[in-house]
Structures are given as C-alpha cells and as structure tokens.
Amino acid sequence: MSQSIDRHKSSSTLHYLAGLGSGTFGAVLFQPLDLLKTRVQQSGSHSIRAAIREVASSSSSLTAFWRGTIPSALRTGNGAAIYLSTLNVVRRRATAIPFATVPHTDPRHSSSSLPKLSNTANLVSGAFSRAFAGFILMPLTVIKVRYESNLYSYNSIAGAARDIYRAKGLRGFFAGFGTTALRDAPYAGLYVLSYEQFKKRLSSWHFPGSSVSHGVGVAMGGSMSATINFSSGVLAGATCSVISNPFDAVKTRIQLQPHRYRNMLQACRKMVAEEGLRSLYDGLTLRMTRKAMSSALSWMVYEELIRRAEAALHGSGAKDHV
C-alpha cells in the first residue's frame, strides 16, 4: 500500500518537474514573440514591423526583446507544471470511467506513454486543467502583460505588484480572468483533443494497421516519437490559436487599459466599433507562431522526460523484483 502511495507521489512530482522544465525553457526561448504580440495588440496598429522598430529603437535593443522574461518564465513554467500535473491526475482518474477510454494501442507503436482517452474526455480534462492552472497563475499573468507593455515602467515584480494592489486591490490581479478562462479553457481542451488525434494519425502512418495491440512489430525509436510529438504539437497549436485569438486580443486590452475596457463584452464591442473585426485578430501571426512552436517544444520535451523517467523507474522496479 505504501509503495503504491509512494509511486503515485513520485509520479505527480515527476509530471510537475517535467512540466516546469519544459514550460520555462519554451517561455524564455519565445519571449520576443510574446512581447511583440502584446505591443501589436495594445497599439491597434496591426503592424508587426512597427512593433519591432519600436522595441529595437530602445537603448538596449537586444535585451528589450526579452523584457518581462522573469514574470513570463515564472508564469509559464509554473503554469505548465500545474497544468500538466493536474492534467495527468485528471486523465489517470478518467481511465476508470468506461466511456472515457479507448482501445489500448501497442505501447511500442505509440509516441507517448500518457493515458489514451476518448475525444470528449481529452476535451474536458484539458479545459478543466487549464482553467484551474489559469486561476492560480492569474496574478503573474497580469504582471507579465504589464511588464511587456510600454504603458507601464516597472523596475521590479514587487513594484508592479504594489502598483496594481494600490490601484485596484486584490481584484486587480485577476483583471481579465473571465476572458482568459474563455480563451484558455477551450484552447487547452481543443489542443489536447487535436494533439492526441494528430499523434494517433501520424503514428498510424508510421505503423500502418497497429491501432490495436497485437504484440508484434518493431518499437518506435526515441527520435521518431519526438518528431511525431513535435509535429502534432505544431499542428494542434496553429489550429487552436486561430480559434482563440479574439479572446486573447480582448484580454490584453482589459489587462492593459482596465479603465477603458471594463469587461469582455464591452471591450469586444468597443474594439470592433472603433477598429473593425480585424482588431480581434491583432497579433495572430505572432501568437500562432509562438503558441505552435512553444507548445510543440514544451509537449515534446515533457513527453520525452516522462517516457525516459518512466522507463528508468520501470527498469529499476523490475530489478527490485528479481
């Protein structure tokens, strides 16, 4: 019994650390794209080139593209850790529900060691886990967006937190949460669903006729599984970014200019009335590129860490029983 508890704890810790590492790495690497997206959405000018010229014209042009990296890495790293560890728990529990599972695939023909669930179960588990993680990390999200904007001149995270609290109280740290949840929960649900489907399709092309375990065949190599996971992440990220970008554009305006954009509906109407429908897709190219690449990289690293760690744990477990 104690061994089962220890195994569960180590598994949860493993998923948390894998998510933390993959999320932080992706956040630092793609911070310039996130910063440019914020600048484009805040200005309403729709011009990526203008945003690049503005950032590059600062006194420290190179480091200026990584402005806000610390709050971004804290938010994204911990957000990925909370999200992926929560998602793992939810999906493991869902395997006990008959209609939430699908027929087992031969593990040697799969690019992933994660639970295999139905489309509905993947959609719901992804949405719930992201909404939960988003609520926990909302204060860092608000600070990150303000750090990236040129409307504020914060010199430290503590200074930003004090300014937000002084102006709006605790409520200020959750500005735009409704819009963020409406953007992130459906995005995450659709992402998990799409990601799993793309993995399934790409794996089936590599191993035709291996949808159900037959106990024969050649195992999938590590490089092939990483390629399949990365490609699936890019395709899923690009697809979901297009669908959820309007929520992201509205959320940015609310967090940067809460006095002008009070809530989701009012902000959406104001943006469309003053700038047209195009304003809802400001920053789409930057967001789609960053989301597709960072999500793909994070999931690939996360899956590979889990695959290797579980293989090592199972190997040591097998030796203990000999």
Image (cartoon, grey):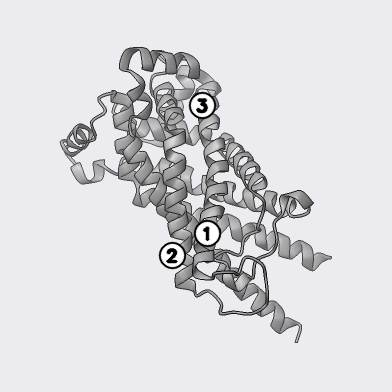
Residue 220 lies, in percent from the top left, at 53, 74
The amino acid type found where label 1 is placed reads: Arg
Q: Are marks 1 and 3 in contact (CB under 8 Å)?
A: no
Q: Find disc 2 in the rendering and name its residue.
A: 227
Left or right placement of residue 110 versus residue 55 in this view? right
Say few, some or many: other residues with alpha carbon within 10 Å of mark 1 (under 14 / 14 to 19 / 20 or more). Answer: some
Location of residue 27 with respect to 7 vertically, above or below = above
Q: Name the mark nearer the viewer: 1 or 3.
A: 1
> Looking at the figure, which quarter contains the N terminus?
bottom right
Q: With 34 as the anchor, is 314 left or right in this view?
A: right
Q: Nearer the viewer, residue 221 or 27?
A: 221
Going from N to C along the chain, the mark reached first, 2 or 3, is 3
x, y percentage for residue 134? 55, 37
Instruction: Name the residue rendered at 67%, 53% in the picture.
Output: 117
For residue 272, above or below residue 77 = above
**Image coords of residue 190 (percent x, y):** 55, 42
- How far apart are the two marked residues, 2 and 1, measured between alpha carbons? 13 Å
**Mark 3 lies on residue:** 179
Query: The disc labelled 2 sits on which kind of residue?
Result: Thr
CA neighbours of label 3 inside 10 A, class few (<14), some (14 to 19), many (20+): many
Q: Secondary structure at mark 3?
A: helix
Q: Residue furthest front?
A: 209
Residue in the picture at 30% in, 31% down: 39
Q: Residue at x 49, y 16 (%)?
A: 265
Q: Is there any visible trace of residue 73 in the rendered image? A: no
Secondary structure at badge 1 equals helix
Q: Which mark is residue 201?
A: 1
Residue 114 drawn above or below residue 152: below
